[in-house]
Image: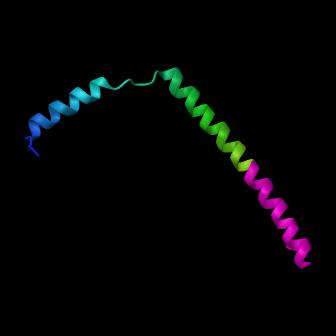
């Protein structure tokens, strides 16, 4: 494999970065909002599952934790 010097490497990096399609501000905001919404939905889901499983275990074992 041919070795490149640091200057050539930086030129290659600049060339590759210029090919990247960067998201617009609107796309970034929409994606961020969707991530926050999905995180909240996931948190509520796991809160509900935890509560149900905890209640079932308490009923099976006859133990109450307050």
Residue under the image location 69 percent in, 43 percent down: 40
Residue depicted at 55% across the width and 27% down the height: 29
Question: Residue at (10%, 40%) from the top-left corner?
Answer: 6
Q: Is residue 10 left or right of residue 39?
A: left
**Residue at the outermost front position:** 1
Q: Position of residue 34 (x, y in %)?
A: 62, 33
Check if residue 52 falls in the magenta segment.
yes
Residue at 73 percent across and 54 percent down: it is 46
In screen coordinates, is 13 left or right of 56? left
Q: Number of marks in the image?
A: 0
- Could you say which quadrant of the image residue 32 lies in? top right
Residue extent of the magenta highlight: 45-66
58 part of magenta stretch:
yes
Confirm whether residue 43 shows in the render.
Answer: yes
Compared with 48, 36 (above or below) is above
Q: Quadrant of residue 50?
A: bottom right
Is 29 situated above or below 62?
Answer: above
Q: Quadrant of the C terminus?
A: bottom right
**Coloured how?**
rainbow
Q: Main secondary structure of the magenta part?
A: helix
Picture coordinates of residue 14, whole percent (x, y): 22, 29
Q: Closest to the observer: 26 or 52?
A: 52
What is the x, y in percent for residue 64?
89, 74
Q: Position of residue 24 (x, y in %)?
A: 46, 21
The reply to whether residue 63 is visible in this rendering is: no
């Amino acid at each position: 494999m041919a070795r490149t010097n640091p200057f050539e490497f930086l030129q290659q990096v600049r060339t590759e970065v210029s090919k990247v399609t960067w998201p617009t501000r609107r796309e970034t905001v929409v994606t961020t909002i969707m991530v926050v919404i999905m995180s909240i939905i996931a948190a509520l889901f796991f809160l509900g599952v935890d509560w149900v499983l905890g209640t079932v275990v308490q009923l099976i074992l006859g133990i109450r934790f307050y």
